[in-house]
Image (spheres, rainbow, N blue to C red):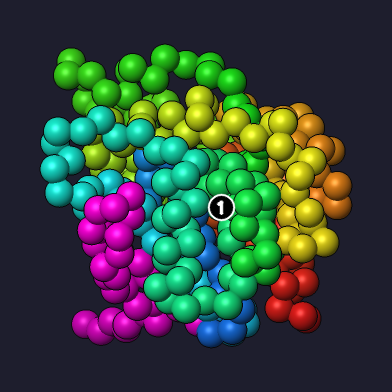
């Protein structure tokens, strides 16, 4: 029997977030332009496993994927049992910037999906001069609530299974079975109340529709990629967002849903690579 080691390296960083010490897990691979990847609500950085292992990407980019506190291998801060987790814009912005500063990254490109796709819009507006650009996957200024988030944290249902069930229809029907089920497995492993707490930012507090015109794409280029099968962040919602940002570029991706980087990477890759080439100067 034999095996091999991947080039992906996992480490922890000790940081202060919201005035509290946090131990944040991250993985990285490659060298070149720093590329920070933001995972979706209720999941973790494993969604970007394909980017981390793609030699054509890591030859030109230092790909960095971190688990937000409360997610994946990043624990909540001490005393979490006495608090009600709710993600806010301020906390999200601080998190990304602290990670970038801790790793001494110079004008990183930030790619984010779903809540991460919203976060990159806030980053471009508030901190665009610190970034090389942003890529929003399933990105829109706001998504109206279309389901009862109370189901995501109840004592009479299995939290992981109901979270996975809630997002299962967002995956394109043509997605490979193995990648579909791995994407859902990440949701089945989420902590109690974490998915619902993330959606506070996505569906309540993080509305940026009225500030989109303030984003300066001459300072921070904005690219958007949205899957045609997504009914959470629909192509129409992404189009309205792109129309409100002077200079933003949007592509609707055929055959993809809400989790393009994890549900069908090979199909997604064809849309991503031309954008990455522009950031790497190729």
Most foreground residue, 104 or 240: 104
Q: Position of residue 121 (x, y in %)?
A: 64, 47
Question: Residue at coordinates 68% horizontally, 64% vertically from top-left?
Answer: 129
Residue 1: image x %, image y %? 21, 82
As drawn, is 207 to the left or to the right of 83?
right
The residue that appears at 23% across and 19% down in the rendered structure is 154
Please say whether residue 218 is visible from this viewpoint. yes
Q: Which residue is mark 1?
A: 112
Q: Looking at the image, how many numbered discs can be counted on the residues? A: 1
Residue 190 inside the magenta-drawn segment: no
Q: Is residue 255 above or below residue 67?
A: above
Q: Residue at x 14, y 33 (%)?
A: 82
**Image quarter for residue 102?**
bottom left
Q: Is residue 180 visible?
A: no
- Which percent across, then down, holds residue 51? 52, 67
Which residue is outermost to the front? 19
Residue 104 lies, with reference to residue 86, above or below; the image says below
Describe the element under mark 1 as helix, strand or loop. Answer: strand
Q: Is residue 15 magenta?
A: yes
User: Would residue 79 appear left or right of 24 to someone viewing this image?
Assistant: left
Q: Residue at x 14, y 36 (%)?
A: 81
**Residue 115 at what x, y percent from top left?**
52, 41
Q: Main secondary structure of the magenta part?
A: strand
Q: Relative to 237, is 52 on the left or the right?
A: left
* First to last magenta residue range: 1-30
């Amino acid at each position: 029997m034999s095996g091999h080691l991947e080039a992906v390296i996992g480490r922890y960083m000790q940081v202060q977030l919201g005035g509290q010490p946090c131990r944040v897990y991250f993985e990285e691979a490659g060298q070149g332009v720093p590329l920070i990847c933001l995972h979706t609500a209720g999941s973790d950085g494993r969604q970007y496993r394909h980017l981390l292992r793609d030699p054509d990407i890591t030859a030109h980019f230092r790909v960095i994927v971190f688990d937000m506190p409360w997610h994946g291998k990043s624990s909540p801060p001490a005393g979490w049992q006495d608090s009600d987790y709710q993600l806010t814009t301020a906390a999200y912005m601080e998190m990304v910037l602290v990670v970038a500063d801790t790793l001494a990254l110079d004008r990183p490109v930030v790619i984010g999906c779903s809540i991460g796709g919203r976060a990159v819009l806030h980053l471009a507006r508030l901190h665009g001069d610190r970034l090389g650009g942003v890529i929003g996957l399933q990105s829109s200024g706001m998504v109206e609530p279309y389901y009862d988030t109370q189901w995501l944290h109840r004592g009479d249902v299995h939290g992981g299974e109901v979270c996975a069930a809630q997002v299962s229809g967002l995956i394109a029907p043509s997605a490979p079975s193995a990648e579909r089920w791995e994407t859902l497995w990440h949701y089945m492993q989420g902590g109690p109340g974490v998915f619902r707490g993330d959606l506070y930012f996505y569906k309540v507090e993080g509305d940026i529709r009225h500030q989109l015109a303030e984003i300066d794409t001459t300072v921070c280029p904005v690219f958007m990629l949205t899957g045609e099968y997504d009914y959470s962040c629909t192509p129409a919602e992404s189009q309205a967002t792109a129309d409100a940002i002077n200079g933003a570029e949007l592509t609707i991706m055929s055959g993809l849903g809400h989790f393009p980087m994890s549900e069908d990477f090979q199909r997604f890759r064809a849309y991503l690579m031309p954008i990455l080439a522009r950031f790497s100067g190729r």
